[in-house]
Image: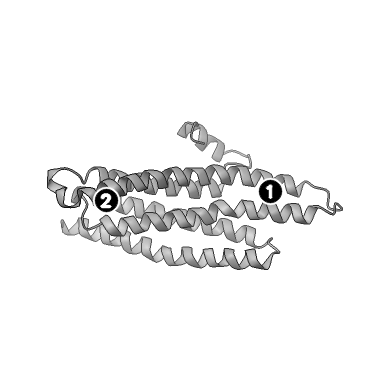
Amino acid sequence: MKSSSIDKWLSELGSKVPVPGGGAVAGLNAAISAATLKMVCEYSTGPKYAANEALMKESAEKLAGLAEEALAQAENDEKAYSKLREAFTIPKDSSGRPDAIELALQAAVEPAVGTIKTVGKILEITEEILDKSNKNLLSDVAVSAANAKAALQSAVVNIEINLKLVKDETLRASLQASVVEAEKLFGDADRLFNSARRKQEEGS
């Protein structure tokens, strides 16, 4: 995914092939959210922002790592889904089929769970810098929050579609907890989006 052009990746996404799919989109949205917020931090340094420059530089560094993390989750989703499809091709009368599918399902949901955690970290940074960042980039803070929520929503539906097939109760409970975590973060993303938008309208 990292070496693909945007045009090529979107063409693959929009074609009748198994991957990339919604899980990869979730990771990409998270990466876009992190990169957009990093831009805000980069434009919030210099003499005018000296009081918070250390925070902005530290946040920019963290966000660069989170963007990479999110892209890795998108790539892992593509790989995991391919493995899941392979597991379903095992003959139904094979004794190893149920375990193979269960293991593949576990791997298939890991990127979505990881995306939720990554977005949580992005939103924490958004909270920290919102009132200290360059006011001319408040619209970009809002764009970051919007993409963060899109990533969360995409991750949740990808967990839920696989959750229907998971038999292991411990894994089911863990995945349901991830969904609850994401749903709480929906509210944070909305609040930060609205706050950035309001501050922009007020010109503060």
Query: Which numbered disc covers residue 26?
Result: none
In this view, the residue in front, 13 or 166, is: 166
**1 vs 2, front mark:** 1
Amino acid type, residue under disc 1 in the picture: Leu
Residue 116 placement (x, y as % from top left): 48, 57
Describe residue 125's horizontal placement relative to residue 72 as left or right: left
Identify the image quadrant of the C terminus. bottom left
53 versus 177 height, above or below: above
Kind of element beneath mark 1: helix
What is the spatial separation of the Cα atoms under label 1 and label 2, in whole angstroms?
Answer: 40 Å
Residue at x 21% of width, y 55% of height: 132
In this view, the residue in front, 61 or 30, is: 61
Describe residue 23's horizontal placement relative to residue 164 as left or right: left
Whether residues under marks 1 and 2 lie with C-beta atoms below 8 angstroms apart, the answer is no
Task: Point out the residue furthest to the right here.
Answer: 93
Residue count near mark 1 (Cα–Cα under 10 Å), binned few <14, some 14–19, many ≥20: some
Residue 147 placement (x, y as % from top left): 40, 51
Residue at x 87% of width, y 53% of height: 93
Residue at x 17% of width, y 59% of height: 202
- Where residue 131 sits, quadrant-wise, is bottom left
Query: Which numbered disc covers residue 84?
Result: 1
Query: Which numbered disc covers residue 139?
Result: 2
